[in-house]
Amino acid sequence: MTHFGVIDLGSNSARLSIWQIDGNHQPHEVLKLKEMVRLSEDMGPEQTLKPAAIARTLAALQRFSAAAKAFPELTLEAYATAAVRQAGNQKAFLRQVKAETGLTITVIPGTREAELDYLGVVNTLPIQNALIMDTGGASTELILVQNRKLIHRVSLPVGSVNLSERFLDADVVRPAQLFNLITEFSSMLNGIWWLRKALNLPIVALGGSNRTLAKIQRRREQRGSYEDIHGYRMATTAANKIYADILDKDLVARKEVPGLSKFRADIIVGGLTPVITMIRYLDSDRLLFSQYGLREGALYSYLNANELGQEA
């Protein structure tokens, strides 16, 4: 049996997934790890990865590297996204990762991240026409899907961590701060000429902040497994209500919201504002949530390439 694995080094979290590939070329997930590293913390206008964030990230990658050694015949791909993509000290960081963990990290452009998100979604959900929206820690990917095909995609250099740091107080969000954030993000949307083609389409939501909406709603509905949100549908009226409830709370109260991770409570307003703004921009009436994105997209890209190789 061969194995395939992906490390996704994001701006807020680092994740590792490993699949066993059986004789019929079918994947079976055998390991999933997640560490909240907040790599983009305090990067500031100089866009520099800071020592504390680097230390947290290196510790997580060392654990990932050690865990991966247990799987024979492993093809391991490691990708870094927005935080490393934007970092002025990117090369020094990658050299340090290689020296201390043995991992070679590939920094992918936002357009490739969007393509992998699309592959992860379209291979696991029965969507036809939709806007895929992946809100990460320091970037937001938008992908227009028509007849299950990727038509347009773009990566915006804003996400839950850097929007929160730029615009919002961590404790109580003031109205003027929120207004400035929404104005900034809306201005970005106005510059995407093809986005109006997504009017009234459902939004397929990826990313930890967006998935928090589904987890909170499933808790409110008292569903058994509130973490199992892949394919879960939510009316945008319910999303708006959750957003309003969170806005009404200070940091201490947000940490007590069922379904909202305490680690994410300080950035959840900044993390949810993009999708809430998009709901209004597109006049969309429903959200569809996906737990699968970049890592699963890389898996399907690998499987497709290997199938073609076998046929040749």
Image (cartoon, rainbow, N blue to C red):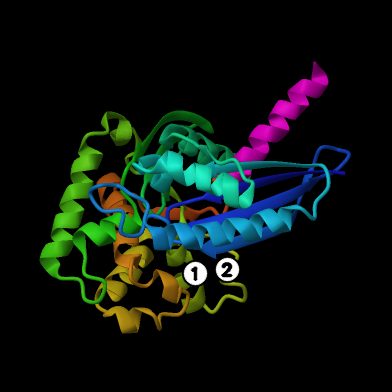
Task: Specify the amino acid type for callout 1.
Answer: Lys
Q: Residue beneath label 1, please?
A: 215
Which is more toward the observer, 263 or 182? 263
Label 1: few (<14), some or many (≥20) within 10 Å? Answer: many
Q: From the top left corner, tell me how far across and down residue 179 is, in percent.
A: 14, 59
Q: Residue at x 64, y 61 (%)?
A: 63
Name the quarter where the N terminus is drawn.
top right
Q: Secondary structure at mark 2?
A: loop
- In the picture shown, does residue 290 fall above or below 294? below
Q: Secondary structure at mark 1?
A: helix
- In the picture shown, does residue 312 fall above or below 24? above
Q: Say whether residue 109 is magenta.
A: no
Extent of the magenta region? 295-312
Q: From the top left corner, tell me how far across and down residue 243 is, in percent.
A: 31, 68
Label 2: few (<14), some or many (≥20) within 10 Å? Answer: some
Q: Say whether residue 309 is magenta.
A: yes
Q: Residue at x 30, y 45 (%)?
A: 282
Asked whether the viewer can see residue 131, the reply is: no
- In the picture shown, does residue 54 fall above or below 202? below
Q: From the top left corner, tell me how far across and down residue 36 is, in percent.
A: 49, 64
Q: Residue beneath label 2, please?
A: 227
- For the residues bearing labels 2 and 1, Cβ distance under 8 angstroms: yes
